[in-house]
Image (tube, rainbow, N blue to C red):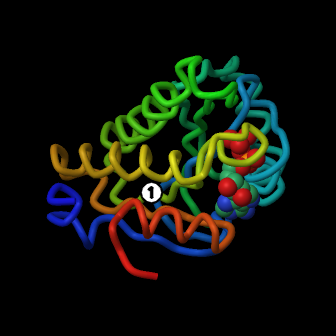
Amino acid sequence: MARTGALPNRIRIELGDITRLTVDAIVNAANASLLGGGGVDGAIHRAAGPELLAECRGVGGCPPGEARLTRGYRLPAGHVIHTVGPIWRGGDAGEPDILARCYRSCLAIAREQGFQTIAVPAIATGVYGFPRDRAARIAVAEVAAYLAQNEIPAIVIFVCFDEANRDAYNAALGRGN
Ligand code: ADP
């Protein structure tokens, strides 16, 4: 807690739809093809419009743990950072490490690009089945460690689609509900 406690204003939790946020970049929990899917990926492609899929076709996919940058097109966000989480197979197949790398990869792109504010969904906790509380602890640990070492991004918003996820992030940050 000491580490995150030093960064209280740079880590925010918001309940809602990530496609509505006006930030420098939103993170997409994509699949390895980057050619669209359900969940947050589907919502982002619907809101961004067909130009996003066209750009993604040219990217050529993304391995789990890595991230790729595109423009945001019709989204209020300027860019989309697409990352591919681990499919949960019980936890002994490297899933926690892959999820941690997703966060580091996204943060590295934000830093390279000079993005001040990014919004991040609960990567891998939907269709990919990563347990929500453990995922929130990994997300908070990776983001807090990165922000402690880097001035950019200035602000990371954890966007929770439901109250259960928001509770998980609050608990991981040691904040009351
Ligand atoms: P994955 O395949 O990585 O598990 P999902 O899209 O199935 O990705 O789920 C990841 C998380 O995104 C889940 O917690 C889900 O509730 C959440 N989610 C779904 N739609 C949205 C949205 N529009 N904004 C923010 N979060 C969303």
Residue plotted at (58% across, 70% down)? 21
Q: Is residue 148 above or below residue 53?
A: below
* Residue 69 located left or right of residue 56: left
Residue plotted at (64% across, 74% down)? 163
Q: Which x, y percent locates residue 137?
A: 43, 50
User: Can see residue 148?
Assistant: yes
Q: Nearer the viewer, residue 128 or 51?
A: 128
Q: Nearer the viewer, residue 51 or 145?
A: 145
Q: Which x, y percent locates residue 108?
A: 35, 35
Residue plotted at (69% across, 17% down)? 60
Q: Nearer the viewer, residue 14 or 136?
A: 136
Q: Is residue 91 above or below residue 80?
A: above
Q: Residues within 10 Å of mark 1 (few under 14, many from 20)?
A: many
Q: Is residue 173 above or below residue 9?
A: above
Q: Count the labels in the image.
A: 1
User: Can see residue 74?
Assistant: no
* Residue 35 located left or right of residue 25: right
Label 1 sits on residue: 118
- Residue 161 occupies quadrant: bottom right
Which element carries disc 1, helix, strand or loop? strand
Q: Quadrant of the N terminus?
A: bottom left
Q: Which x, y percent locates residue 28?
A: 63, 45
- Residue 30 occupies quadrant: top right
* Residue 53 located left or right of residue 87: right
Whether the residue carrying mark 1 lies under 8 Å from ligand 1 is answered with no
Tag 1: amino acid = Ile
Residue plotted at (66% across, 47% down)? 125
